[in-house]
Amino acid sequence: MKLLGTGSSLPHLQVSNSDLAKFLDTGDEWIVPRTGIRTRHVISDENLEDLAADAAKKALEDAGLNVSDIDLLICSNVVNEYVTPSLSCVLAYKLGLACPCFDINCACPGFIYAMDMADSYFRSGKAGNVLIVCAEEPTRMVDWKDRSTCVLFGDGAGAAVFGKGDNLKGIRLSSEPAPDKICEYRKLLPTPYISKEENEVPMLMKGKDVFRFAVTTSVRDIHGILDEAGISIEDVDYFMIHQANLRIIDGIRERLGVTEEKFPVNIADHGNSSSASCPILLDECRRKGMFKEGDILVFSAFGAGLLSASAVLMC
Ligand code: ACO
């Protein structure tokens, strides 16, 4: 597969750490050194599907393709206002797409999981062009009275169009199932037969465990895929790491022994936008003209599950 175009879309409202300090006992002095986050985009009067459609249209335009050229739409999403139909169906309706479409919920590594599925469709000859849209509103998952989680997240959508090609040089998906590390429960409607107790609980996270998992799996996966692909760390042009936390990104970079210039970051003004973070970063870097043909990008992401994934993609 080969990257043909990218797009992204962010909510207009930006909420700074000082804005949060108006209703929470927090501020720059705690949030910045621990996370690198200064401000984040937060959904207010927008709908997630509109951000997703905006990102998708920009990616199609960048790729020079029309909706009729797309054979498959994959949406990566954890939460949105619809239970059914899937976000991909809502998005397909907005875009005027009539190809097969489905959602995946793989938390933060969703973009790389979607790339892996797209690759399978290309290999089996079932698709010529695939549109991946990662649209997330994690700010609707957290308790805004819980300063240990709500300060970490931001919303947004990132999209990428892939066509046939042999630019995917390696991909690795892995899991260490531990549902209690990052979890959220929702209550379903009652029936006459439900006797079990059900709770609605906003996102709970064991931050230190997630931190350890993120750094160790990312370093392991990156070394693994590069070894398999026969590419040395020095030959990688950019490491596109899930923007969860600057300390996690720095921890990965230091363990890999790579300089800061090869680790683009946008966490300071985005926060953690779950699976949208990698494609938003990809789009922002592409639009700045950072990549040239033949550049080697390594993606790595980790999150609830616990799931992790890495990929090597040549521009
Ligand atoms: N402002 C001020 N104080 C706070 C805040 C806040 N926003 N949040 C927590 N504190 C307090 C705590 O109450 C605690 O106080 P106490 O010692 O009096 O009890 C103190 O700060 C220290 O809290 P710790 O949890 O020990 O802080 P830590 O240094 O571990 O940092 C953090 C917490 C930033 C969440 C860290 O564990 C982390 O980055 N984990 C990774 C989380 C992550 O990135 N998750 C997302 C990845 S997966 C995904 O994308 C869904």
Image (cartoon, rainbow, N blue to C red):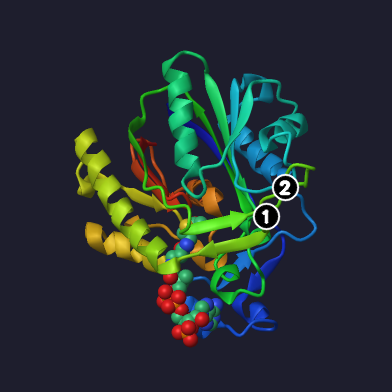
Quarter of the N terminus within the rendering = top left
Disc 2 + disc 1, Cβ < 8 Å: yes
- Give the SS element for disc 1: loop
In the image, 294: left or right of 229? right
Q: CA distance from mark 2 to mark 1?
A: 8 Å
> On the image, numbered disc 1 is attached to which residue?
198
Amino acid of disc 2: Leu
Q: Which mark is residue 188?
A: 2
Amino acid of disc 1: Glu
Residue at the image position 41 percent from the left and 61 percent from the top = 210
* Residue nearer the viewer, 55 or 252: 252
Going from N to C along the chain, the mark reached first, 2 or 1, is 2
Q: Where does the image place residue 234, in percent across and percent down from the top left? A: 21, 49
Q: Which mark is residue 249?
A: none
Residue 245 visible, this orientation: no
Q: Where does the image place residue 301, in percent across and percent down from the top left? A: 42, 50
Q: Where does the image place residue 187, in percent across and percent down from the top left? A: 70, 52
Quarter of the C terminus within the rendering = top left
In the image, residue 308 sits, relative to residue 39, either above or below, namely above
In the image, residue 51 sits, relative to residue 164, either above or below, namely below
In the image, 178: left or right of 142? left
* Residue nearer the viewer, 309 or 174: 174
Q: Where does the image place residue 182, in percent across and percent down from the top left? A: 50, 58
In the image, 57: left or right of 289? right
Local crowd size for mark 2, using a 10 Å CA cut-off: few (<14), some (14–19), many (≥20) = few
